[in-house]
Amino acid sequence: MRATVLVRPKHGILDPQGEAVEIALEHLGFAVSGARIGKVVDLEVEADDPEQARAQVEKMCEQLLANPLMESFEVEIHG
Amino acid sequence: MASPQPRIGVVTYPGSQDDRDALWALGALDAEAVPVWHEEQELPDLDAVVLPGGFSYGDYLRCGAIARFSPATAAVTAFADAGGLVLGICNGFQVLCEAGLLPGVLLRNESLRFVCRDVPLVVERADLPFMSRCSVGQQIVIPVKHGDGRWFAPPELVRELEANRQVVLRYGEPCNGSVDDIAGICNERGNVMGLMPHPEHAVDPLLGSADGALILASLVESARERVLALN
């Protein structure tokens, strides 16, 4: 089963990369604010159903893919 | 009786860079420096361990995140749990944080720039095995070279660490945006310490400062005292 994990810097954590990208976008003439940079992890997981897949991927996030001190995560299961 | 030479291990991960300097510095400070390969399941007979700087496993995912799974890190964790002295320098500090041996995490520098220069540090603790040659309030100069050195922890955790006196070193001037200018911390028990500056690059005065020797010689001395206590 295919899964996508979105890892984001937690609210309130300074994200200098996001700030730099925001400034660059402003230089291009876009009116933007609140740019934040995270990560995407795509993976295939062996599971019988989407619930089981989600439970497994959430465990992966807790144990490795995200650091709970600074990152939040979101899991999408693509059936 | 001649004073015993303590055996201090330096772990080499794929991507470690400062392992050789650490081995050299420990040797220059009269320890027997022992290289430890990352695949070793068990540590040799050691009196202390240093995790060196570099980019272990390419710093993939997050700095230190993959090194946490190497067999040598598991052995170092067991060593620390048994009360052994463990010092993590730069990437070694990041590994210790990811492995849960030290609190917090190291994030990208606020400036987004790699900082590589001598920095003044203020000593906050001198009663640790790594700091016995320093005095509280003393300013020392040791180089940093990192892109991800901004130590971070949520405010409640920072308060807890301050209350437990786990802050060991602070930058004497802004360096990377680290919370409260924290440059080095220890665990509650005081046998594990991590710092972003590189004491192993400041042992020979020819390189501009020998203040790094204050930290490493403290470690060598403490390791030697442990050998003497056992004999």
Image (spheres, coloured by chain):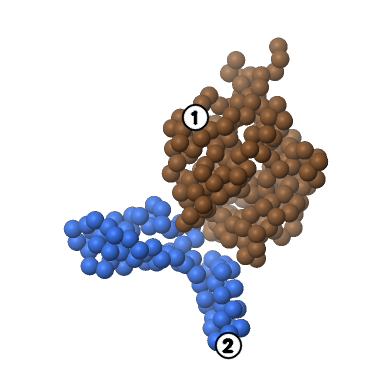
Chain colours: A blue, B brown
Look at mark 1 in the image and give the residue it sits on. B43
Where is residue B88 drawn, in percent x and y? 59, 42
Label 2: which secondary element: loop
What residue sits 43% from the left and 58% below the top?
Answer: A66
Q: Which chain carries label 2?
A: A
**Of helix, strand and loop, which one carries label 1?**
loop
10 Å neighbourhood of mark 1: few (<14), some, or many (≥20)? many
Q: Which residue is drawn at 59% across and 47% down?
A: B54
Figure quadrant of residue A30: bottom right
Q: Is residue B44 visible?
A: yes
Q: Which amino acid does label 1 sit on?
A: Leu
Q: Which of A27 and B132 is in front in this view?
A: A27
Q: What residue type is labelled 2?
A: Gly
- Residues B223 and B125: in front is B223
Q: Distance between the residues labelled 2 and 1?
A: 57 Å
x 35%, y 55%: residue: A60
Q: Residue A29 shows which numbered tag? A: 2
Residue B5, disc: none
Q: Residue B168: x and y, percent?
A: 66, 45
